[in-house]
Image (cartoon, rainbow, N blue to C red):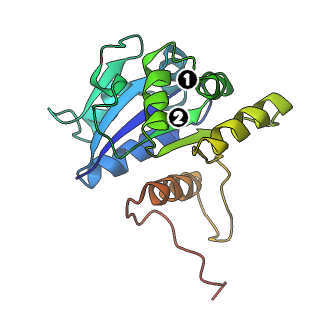
């Protein structure tokens, strides 16, 4: 199976991260979590969970999956020699997006993202902010030009969702698609038939 890094920041929308981790683990993928301090606070507020509970809830704590302290720049995911199939920062705050765009790598999440960029590995950022300022848009353009996929959490309605969970699954399913991970979280558009 594949190996993925999932970063969680302090933007609202940590339910997206919870569902992504659940789905990756459900299909046997290796998941390496890194969560910012504000990411932990927002996730606890929005979902009642912390990072370890996400992995425990889905049976993901193992020798092959784990959670890292965001200040631990000696963690395996800080090195380009630690091969991954991609990284998703979900949700991605504008502060984190700006740090990644500048290449400052002042913490593990930023360093892991920087490694993906320099090693030409898949990096998907799921910003959760509105409205967007000119600075946000410039940072997104900089990252897009560097090969990063900018994937705003904008649910669609053509599949006629009947719950918030279905809207979350649509975004998570599309993120999984962008990584090349098969899933059954949403129905592909079929032209309305």
| Residue with the mark numbered 1 | 42
**Image point (59%, 83%), residue name:** 190
Circle 2 sits on which residue?
Answer: 14
* Contact, mark 2 vs mark 1 (Cβ under 8 Å): yes
Helix, strand or loop for disc 2:
helix
Instruction: Pinpoint residue 96: horizontal percent, then vertical percent.
Output: 60, 24
Query: In which quarter of the view is residue 42 placed?
Result: top right
* Residue 2 visible to the viewer: yes
Residue at image location 48% in from the left, 31% down from the top: 113
Q: Image quarter for residue 111?
A: top left
Q: In this view, does 28 lie to the left or right of 104?
A: left
Q: Sequence-wise, which precedes: disc 2 or disc 1?
A: 2
In the visual, does 45 lie left or right of 53? right
In the rendered image, the residue lying farthest to the left is 63
Is residue 90 or residue 142 the one in the foreground? 142
Q: Name the residue at the bottom extreme.
A: 193
Q: In this view, does 95 lie above or below 138?
A: above
Disc 2 residue crowd, few under 14, some 14–19, many 20+, Cα 10 Å: many
For residue 113, above or below residue 26? above
Please provide percent x and percent y for residue 85. 35, 47
Q: Where residue 24 sits in the image (x, y, percent)?
A: 33, 49
- Binning the other alpha carbons within 10 Å of mark 1 as few (below 14), some (14 to 19) or many (20 upward) gives many
Please state which of residues 75 and 63 is positioned toward the viewer in this rendering.
75
């Amino acid at each position: 199976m594949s190996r993925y890094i999932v970063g969680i920041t302090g933007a609202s929308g940590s339910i997206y991260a919870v569902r992504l981790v659940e789905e990756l683990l459900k299909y046997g993928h290796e998941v390496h979590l890194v969560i910012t301090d504000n990411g932990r606070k927002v996730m606890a507020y929005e979902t009642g969970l912390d990072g370890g509970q996400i992995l425990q809830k889905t049976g993901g704590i193992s020798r092959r999956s784990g959670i890292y302290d965001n200040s631990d720049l000696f963690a395996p995911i800080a090195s380009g020699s630690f091969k991954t199939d991609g990284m998703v920062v979900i949700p991605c705050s504008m502060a984190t997006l700006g740090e990644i765009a500048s290449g400052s790598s002042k913490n593990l999440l930023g360093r892991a993202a920087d490694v993906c960029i320099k090693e030409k590995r898949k990096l998907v950022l799921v910003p959760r902010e509105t409205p967007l300022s000119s600075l946000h848009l410039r940072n997104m353009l900089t990252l897009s030009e560097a090969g990063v996929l900018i994937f705003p959490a904008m649910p669609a309605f053509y599949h006629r969702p009947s719950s918030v969970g279905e809207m979350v699954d649509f975004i998570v399913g599309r993120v999984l698609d962008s990584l090349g991970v098969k899933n059954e979280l949403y129905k592909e558009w079929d032209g309305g038939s």
